[in-house]
Image (tube, rainbow, N blue to C red):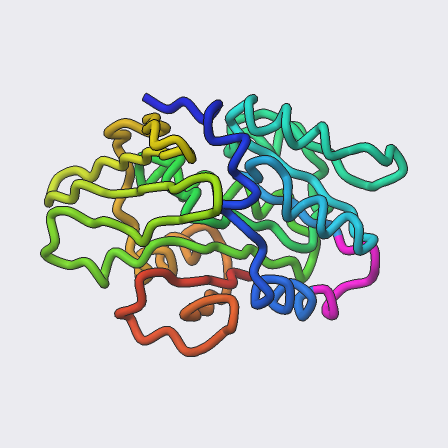
Amino acid sequence: MISVKKLVEYYEELFPISEQQKVFYEELTKDYNKPVKFLRFGCGTGTFESYLSKLGHDVTGVDIYNDFLNSANLRKRNQLMAIRFFQMNYSDASKYLGKGFYNVISILNSRLFDFQTRDEILNFLKSCRILLAPGGKIIVEHVNFDAFEGISFIQFPVRESVRAKLYSEITNSRDEQEFTMKLENGSGKISTIVDNYPIYKMRPGELVEIAREAGYKKTELFAGFSKSPFLGKEAKFTAIIQ
């Protein structure tokens, strides 16, 4: 069960844009003519997309949850901004969005959890190839399951703001992994956002293999948006696929 409605109000403060993320994407823009065409899957309430749009880029956000997108569209106060949001299945995006149009495609905050099988991830990356312009790149930010080898219960650091706390955990076994997320508001009331949702335990090395199968030539792994070397034990990793 997944219900993001109660998360919408707190999304921006619980998933802030870090300075390292801003610098990382600023460096990416140097490889392309402006406006750079950005596409993000799992865009949430569109905070980062609004930021990129205000810098003069052409931005598209996609999510599967309408509650997120209703909030994202409220940000489009200036109709002259080159920004748009769509609700759709990620792997169907190549049927509806511009083929060979996007310079940078992103899926951040471990939103690869939206896929439940290896084949779904493979098909998603194949779909992205259709959407990417020549020289385009895919940015993936995801949990590093190698760092939790042999651990049956993974509890991630609490995301916390003045008004709310977000708890995320994975029950991890050899055959299946289930993701749970709960929100605690300022009055102490706890709401379940994600309840025992089956996910695919994709490791960094497997992402490299899947990207190769999908037809990409190069995948670089980093410890984060700082682009520091990925040593394999970090809780998360960032990948640049091209």
Front residue of this view, candidates 63 and 51: 51
Q: Is residue 219 left or right of residue 129?
A: left
Could you tell me residue 173's position as x and y percent?
11, 43
Q: Is residue 151 left or right of residue 99?
A: left
The image quarter in which residue 207 lies: bottom left
Main secondary structure of the magenta stretch: loop
Quadrant for the C terminus in the image: bottom right
Q: Point out the residue furthest to the right here.
A: 80
Residue at the image point whose x is 65% and y is 45% from the top: 39
Front residue of this view, candidates 32 and 7: 7
Judge whether 10 appears above or below 216 on screen.
Answer: above
The image quarter in which residue 113 lies: top left
Could you tell me residue 102's position as x and y percent?
70, 49
Give the magenta part as a residue range: 29-36
Q: Point out the residue furthest to the front here.
A: 187
Could you tell me residue 179's position as x and y percent?
27, 37
Quadrant for the N terminus in the image: top left
Q: Is residue 84 left or right of residue 22?
A: right
Residue at the image point whose x is 46% and y is 62% from the top: 239
Judge whether 132 appears above or below 19 on screen.
Answer: above
Q: Is residue 215 left or right of residue 50?
A: left
Does the magenta run of residues contain 62?
A: no
Q: Is residue 125 visible?
A: no
Could you tell me residue 203's position as x and y percent?
29, 56
Residue at the image point whose x is 67% and y is 45% from the top: 49
Residue at the image point whose x is 17% and y is 38% from the top: 176
Q: Is residue 174 visible?
A: yes
Q: Exactly how many numbered labels are in the figure?
A: 0
Front residue of this view, candidates 141 and 121: 141
